[in-house]
Image: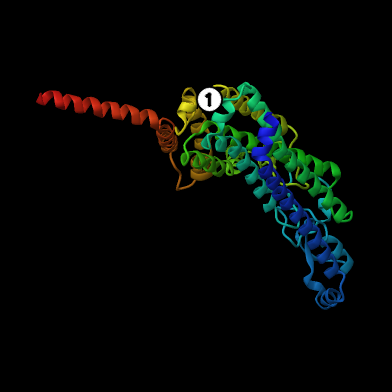
Amino acid sequence: MLKTIYLKRYGKALIAFALIIFGIYFLNAFSAVSNWHSQNNYLHSQEFKAEYENHSEAFTYWNTEKNQDTPYASRQDYIADQLYFYRDSYQAQQNSNKEHQNYNPKTVYYGMTGQGYALLSLLLVGLAGFLIFFIDEKTAFNRFLFALPQKRSQLFTQKLIYVALPILGSLLFSQLFYICYLKLGIPAPYLNVTWGQLLHSVVTSFTLNVLLFTCSMFIGSMVGNLILGPLTWVGFVFFASFLPPAWNSFLNLFNRQNADPFSFNPENLFIYTLGKTGGYWWMIPIFLVLIFLFLGWTARKYRTLSLENDGDYLLHQDSRWPIWGLMWVFTSFIIINAFTNTWQLYFILKDSQEAVSFTQTILSTFITITIIGILLFVLVFFSVIKTKWEIYRAKKHNLKINDFS
C-alpha cells in the first residue's frame, strides 16, 4: 500500500527529476564530444594549415626544462598537443599537455569544457533531498501518513526506497552514462583518462552528492517554518559551497614552514565533477560515516515527530541545543576560514610592519564566533524567547493593574 501511495504522490516528480538530471549530463557530454570533434576538424583544415605555416613562430608552449617559450617542432605536434582533453589546472593554455597523460593524485585536472553541469546537478539533488520531507510536513501529508496502520519506521524506510533511491539511482545512471559517452566519443590517447580514473571520480562525486542529499533531507525533516525552513537550507548550501576553500585555508595554517606538508592536495578533498580528478579514496568512508549519522538522526526523529509543532522553526524541541551547536560550529568554521581569514592574516602579516597582535586576533575570533552564536541562538530558540517575553510582559502588565487596584 505504501508503495502505491508514494509512487502516486511522487511518481511524476521523480520522472521529471530523472529527465532533468539525465538531460544535464547528456547535454554536457554531447557538448564536450562535439566541441572536441569541431576543434579536431579545424586543426586538420586547410585554413589552419595555412595559418600555421604563415605564423609558425607564434605557436609555442612553455618548456619547463628550459623555462622559456619553445616553438613546436611541427604542426602535427601542435595539433596532437591541443587535442588532449584533460589538462592541469595550474598550467596555462599554451603549455604542453602531453605530460598530463600520466596521473598525479595531487593534481587538479580540468576538461576542455565547463564543469558547471556537476554543480547544477549537485544543487538539484540537495534540493530534492530537502523537499521530500519538508513538503510532506507543510502540505499536511504527514497527518495522512501517520493515520495509516503502518509504523513510522516503515513509513520512513519505504520513503527511502520508493522516493530517495530513485532520485539517487537516476543520478548514478546519468553519471555512468556521462563517462561512457566521453570514453566512446573521444578517441585515445586524446581522452587522457582511464576507465578506472573515471569510475573513481564517479564514486567520489556520487558519495558527495549522497552526503548533500542526506544533509538536506535531515534539514527538511527538522524545520517546520514555511519561510525560515527553506532559507535555512539555502543558507546551508551557501556556506557548504565554501567548505572546500575553508578547509584548504585552515590546512594552510600548518603550511607556513613546509612548502608541501601534506601527502594530499586539500583542493582534491571534495570532488563533485566527473573526470580525471578522482580525489582520495579515504574521503569516501568519511562521507559514508556522515551519511549514516545524519540518516540515523533523521530516522530517529521522524519516529517521534509531533504534529503539534507544525509551524515552529524546529519541529523537535529536544533537538534545539544539538542543532544550535552544530550550526554554530559549522558556520563559525566557514566564516573564520573562508570570509574573515583572521588567523591566515595573522600569520601572513606576522613579520611585517602591518602585523596584527596575537591578542587582537584572539579577540577578533572570539567576537566573531560570539556574534554568530547569538544570532543562531535567536533563530533556533526564537519561539522559546518569544514565549518567555510574552509571559514577562503579561506578568508586568498584571503588576501594573494590581498597583491601581
Q: Quadrant of the N terminus?
A: top right
Q: Which residue is mark 1?
A: 305
- Expressed as whole percent of the image width and height from the top left, the position of residue 172 reads 76, 41
- Expressed as whole percent of the image width and height from the top left, the position of residue 155 reads 64, 26
Residue 382 seen in render: yes
Q: Residue furthest left?
A: 404
For the residue pair 209 and 278, the one nearer the viewer reads as 209
Q: Is residue 298 left or right of residue 67?
A: left
Q: Please, what is the three-letter code of the amino acid marked with disc 1?
A: Leu
Residue 74 seen in render: no
Residue plotted at (72% across, 33% down): 284
Corner quadrant of residue 66: bottom right
Q: Is residue 142 left or right of residue 365?
A: right
Q: Quadrant of the C terminus?
A: top left
In the image, is residue 376 above or below residue 21? above
- Expressed as whole percent of the image width and height from the top left, the position of residue 311 reads 45, 34
What SS does tag 1 mark?
loop
For the residue pair 213 and 199, the one nearer the viewer reads as 213
For the residue pair 203 and 333, the one nearer the viewer reads as 203
Corner quadrant of residue 338: top right
In the image, is residue 149 above or below residue 347? above
